[in-house]
Image: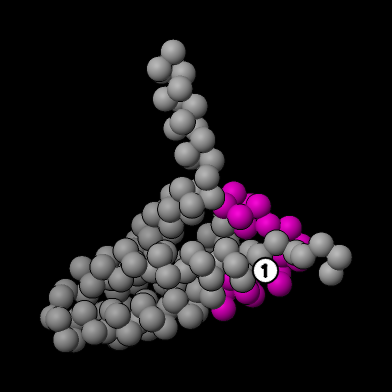
Amino acid sequence: MSRILTNSAIFGLVGRQQVKYLLAGAITAVLHFAIFSGGWLVLRDVVPYPLVAIGAQALTVLAVYPAYRAVVFHATGPWIAGLIRFYIACAAVLLLSVVSLVSLVEVARLPVPVAQIVTALWSPVVAYPVQRFWTFRKPVAGS
């Protein structure tokens, strides 16, 4: 009996939006880190690392938007308008992330990949309320 309750509790937890968001965020962070790391390794002698971070973020946003829209937030409505809001929200987090990244590298003297990981850890916490209440807000009835 306890196994059924445990499985039920686990499935209920995984079904929660916050848990889905954290899982999607983990996948997003890994994808972003892979794109950033690959770009930085290839371009580090010709492109400053903040620009590599910006490019990696742009590619990551385009890749993950469908999953956030369909799986995490179950959004409806115009796809392109949602993508634009998602991109704007991600750009705001990107601005904070680049400031954090540069600060961690230039002031705290962390290696670029380590600073990127640290930055990736706090980004989803900042982004979740914006994504939930603005990007993927539910339409108000009658409007």
Residue lying at the far left of the rendered structure: 109
Identify which amino acid the numbered label 1 is placed on.
Gly
Residue at 48% from the left image edge and 80% from the top image edge: 92
Decide which of 55, 105 is in the foreground and name it.
105
Residue at 36% from the left image edge and 77% from the top image edge: 97
Q: Is residue 142 magenta?
A: no
Left or right of residue 73, residue 101 in this image: left
For the residue labelled by badge 1, is the local secondary structure a helix, a strand or a loop?
A: helix
Residue 116, position as x, y percentages in the image: 28, 70
Q: Is residue 129 visible?
A: yes
Where residue 53 sits, quadrant-wise, is bottom left
Q: Is residue 82 above or below residue 106?
A: above
Left or right of residue 130, residue 6 in this image: left
Residue position for label 1: 82
Q: Is residue 59 visible?
A: no
- Residue range corresponding to the magenta coloring: 69-88
Residue 19, position as x, y percentages in the image: 46, 48
Image quarter (top left, top right, bottom left or bottom right) of the N terminus: top left
Colouring: one colour
Q: Is residue 8 above or below residue 59?
A: above
Residue at 48% from the left image edge and 52% from the top image edge: 18
Where residue 105 sits, quadrant-wise, is bottom left
Image quarter (top left, top right, bottom left or bottom right) of the C terminus: bottom right
